[in-house]
Amino acid sequence: MMANLLDLDAAGLAAFFHAHGEKPFRARQVLQWVHQRRESDFARMSDLAKALRVKLAAAAVVQAPEIVGDHTAADGTRKWLLKVDGANAVDAVFIPETGRGTLCVSSQAGCTLDCPFCATGKQGFNRNLSTGEIVGQLWLANRMLGGERPVTNVVLMGMGEPLLNLDHVIPALRLMLDDNAYGLSRRRVTVSTSGVIPGMDRLRDECPVALAVSLHAPNDALRDRLVPVNRKYPMRELLRACARYLERAPRDFITFEYVMLDGVNDADEHAHELAQIATRVSCKFNLIPFNPFPAAGFKRSPPERMRAFAQILQRQGVTVTTRKTRGDGIDAACGQLAGQVTDRTRRANAPRVVELRP
Ligand code: SAH
Ligand code: SF4
């Protein structure tokens, strides 16, 4: 079996070289070639001995997912559809802003958690992505965009629940942080979770990066409906897990994401309840306008409702930002990523929304 070097973080690559009777420092050179110079052809790795290059070519590949779709919106947001196997493709989205470029990365083909307002959740789940498929999205984006450092920030906010795939997500994060690979600081890499508590604790212990928690409701009754994993990990436990995470986090607050659903979770009283929560854990709120997709069954809160909601929080001393919707026209906004996933979960009540694109 050929090893895919994109699957290996520094420790994995050192073990690979050791197994092949090579010195560990070769691993550092190869990391730089692969991730910094975006080279996939061993023959061109000119400072490696010829014999080593031949040996590598026989034992390994550098293989990222295949780009099968590439769309750019009027605002510069660019979405790639990446084929990961014969049946599945996932989305990666690049969002350029002044002074930085953020890549939104997927961690699973589909998602098991079935939040009713999310296109990824609606389509079911097929499988976890490998480390190479996760970090390969960053590798490809840098390659496609060109230039010194096109991607300055990474958010794991694409398809899937990253904390249900930590065996592959953690090595991918380590590569993002590694000075011989992408060298991003922990504050520039954000994992978003719907609140999978054991995963939060593991991430805290093994690779604490910035954390965003998808709250979306101020109490268990409503959150049980909007974020079904809440039935397993209720809010009281979740807030405790946030406090534990903060002991190791690179930032001194948790970002709470809150998708604004018209007439569902956007009343004044919900804002007051959230302000109470904010007294229990150091946090900032990020209000997200709901992004529609076919058969979603929800509507976006009107802008004046979002403003009034934000004001209630701000008046009680809570920091609030409102997310701009990006990528109009190419379905690249939060929650619209549907990729092309073959659902093997056969969920009884989940209508499959698989958007096939040319
Ligand atoms: N599974 C993780 C990360 C992927 S989703 C999580 O749920 O946090 C990234 C963010 O987009 C989450 O906050 C999610 O709740 C939000 N989101 C999902 N569907 C959305 C939609 N239709 N409109 C706006 N935001 C949505
Ligand atoms: Fe999964 Fe996140 Fe979508 Fe919920 S919002 S279904 S956890 S990807």
Image (tube, rainbow, N blue to C red):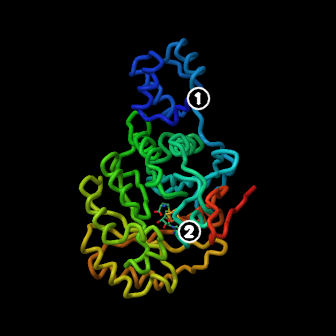
Quadrant of the drawing holding the N terminus: top right
**Residue drawn at (36%, 82%) of the image:** 271
Q: Which residue is mark 2?
A: 118
Q: Is residue 216 something that shows in the picture?
A: yes
Q: Quadrant of the C terminus?
A: bottom right
For residue 102, above or below residue 242: above
Q: x%, y% of residue 193?
A: 43, 61
Q: Amino acid at mark 1?
A: Val
Label at residue 237: none
From what the image shows, is residue 213 above or below residue 306? above
Q: Residue at x 45, y 81 (%)?
A: 265
Q: Is residue 230 left or right of residue 254?
A: right
Viewer-proximal residue among 333 and 116? 116
Front residue of this view, candidates 180 and 160: 160
Which amino acid does the dot numbered 2 rest on? Cys
Give the residue drawn at x 39%, y 61%. Answer: 212
Residue 298, percent from left and from top: 57, 79
27 relative position to 206: left or right: right
